Amino acid sequence: MSNERSRETPPSRRAVLRTAAGLAASALLPRGLTAMTTAAPPATGRARRDGPRIVVIGAGAFGGWTALSLLRRGAQVTLVDAWGAGHSRASSGDDTRVIRAIYGGNATYTDMVLRAWAGWHAAEERWGRRVFRQTGALWMFEGDDTAAATSAPLLAARDVEVERMDAGEVARRWPQIRADGIRTAWYEPGAGYLLARLACERVREEFIAMGGTWRLATATPGPIRGGRMAGVVLAEDGNATRLEADAYVFACGPWLGTLFPEAIGTGVLPTRQDVVYFGLPAGDTRYDDGRFPVWINTGARLMYGIPGNERRGFKVADDTAGSPVNPTTLDRRISPAALQLARATVARRFPGLVGAPVAETRVCQYEMSPTGDFLMDRHPEAENAWLLGGGSGHGYKMGPAIGEDLTAQLLDARPVPEAFTYRAFAAARARLTSTSTRRHS
Ligand SMILES: Cc1cc2nc3c(=O)[nH]c(=O)nc-3n(C[C@H](O)[C@H](O)[C@H](O)COP(=O)(O)OP(=O)(O)OC[C@H]3O[C@@H](n4cnc5c(N)ncnc54)[C@H](O)[C@@H]3O)c2cc1C
């Protein structure tokens, strides 16, 4: 790839759309499951009076997009969340999330992210508002760069631009970076970040505008009898009501294991993740998203960050899964160790920001599955209940594709990749002996 290509070149949007269309045409495979409707997909439709009634619990990236997608296919959907879309304790509730196409040489995720990208673009057009910021993403490898090197042919085959460069080229293009110790770097000009919590709210607004029913309530799964879940109980303002539907989708993020202690339990483990936003010098745009990329530095740990970050400051975070937490009661004050690590990263890579003040901090949680793969399948004992989660630190960007895939699974009996099935999840959970063996994509 040419280094001279403009950093503003869109992420092969043509390729994104072409890939999405190709996948849509080829993926309608039977699975032997009972489809709930055989209607042709009116992808831009609204709820139909005769559409299946579906309750989606959780209005984060996974549940919000699924609810919207089901609604656009004609289902009558109720979306329920205990605290609102993209709230402060939700995994989707930060200002920003990275979207990039290098995916460790994994073709499933590569195709998924390209479909998601197409979904984000389409949504931006419907909303008349941008939620994607194209900054490019720079991967800096201090050691093995297999994750990027194995992705390169996949991306080339899909017409997605990626450039390999050495430390000297990094320093030349971004003099803000101290390039010492970088063995190779890979740059995705089309990548960037999404306005995470804002987009959750946009999805909810579109869902309501198209006829979806929104409830701010806590849902408890009903009993499972004869292989079916018998409703959910909603607690709203201290009152409990029962809600029955044809199907239930539990997209409860880090709460999934609490809701289903046996089927999920610690198989989806909420882990503590500390994030620091350093204040930028006044009137200085060198670290802002017009001039600086999303960056990922892989060395002893994988550290990453987002430039400018919606005026919140220069975001720095550690991708290592932290200690298990309770997402409801977690005290979200940053730890001194996390702050020290973020400062050390800045000192090592971004010398111009040494001594920058902490503008804000945030403590979030990953929802780690045993393999780092998503879970998108029926409850093992209830044919009308779906379990959706395990974002494992990389799920936000996939929202539109996840919504599309769960909808196709639920309405058309279209299978998801084996890695996302309950079977694969349960087998990996059984193999798991300690949290440290969890893989993070
Ligand atoms: C620090 C950090 C950085 C990350 N960076 C990236 C990134 O750069 N790119 C990327 O793609 N991904 C990233 N991720 C991962 C991504 O944010 C998550 O995988 C994704 O947001 C998970 O979405 P979700 O909908 O499954 O969960 P959530 O957003 O947590 O949503 C679950 C929702 O379910 C609701 N809920 C739960 N139980 C109930 C109940 N009983 N009744 C009613 N409502 C209920 C909750 O209130 C919540 O709103 C990151 C995550 C963290 C923490």
Image (tube, grey):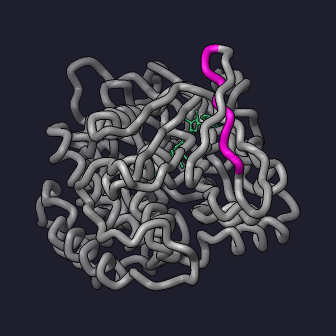
Image quadrant holding the C terminus, namely bottom right
Residue 305: x %, y % from top left: 43, 43
Looking at the image, residue 219 sits to the left or right of residue 313; the answer is: right
Would you identify the image quadrant in which residue 83 lies? top right
Q: Residue at x 54, y 82 (%)?
A: 31
Using the rendered image of the protein, determine whether residue 165 is visible from the camera's viewpoint.
no
Q: In this rendering, is residue 21 above or below 42?
A: below
Position in image of residue 163 (x %, y %): 28, 70
Q: Is residue 175 above or below residue 430?
A: above
Q: Taking 408 as reference, is 160 left or right? A: left
Between 58 and 324, the one nearer to me in the picture: 58
- Asked if one can make out residue 112 in the rendered structure from this viewpoint, the answer is yes
Q: Quadrant of residue 354?
A: top left
From the viewer's perspective, is residue 20 above or below residue 6? below
Question: Is 425 situated left or right of 375 in this image?
Answer: right
Q: Residue furthest top?
A: 237
The foreground one among 254 and 151 is 254
Q: Quick one: 170 or 199, which is closer to the camera? A: 199
Identity of the residue furthest to the front in this view = 50
Q: Quadrant of residue 351?
A: top left
The percent coordinates of residue 376 (x first, y second) are 58, 63
Q: Residue at the location (63% across, 59% down)?
A: 384
Check residue 361 for magenta coloring: no
The N terminus appears in which quarter of the rendering?
bottom left
Residue at the spot 39% in from the left edge and 72% down from the top edge: 38
* Range of residues picked out in magenta: 230-237
For the stretch drawn in magenta, what is the main secondary structure? strand
In this view of the protein, which residue sits in the foreground, 232 or 321? 232
Seen at 32% across and 66% down, the residue is: 115
User: Ligand 1 falls in which quarter?
Assistant: top right
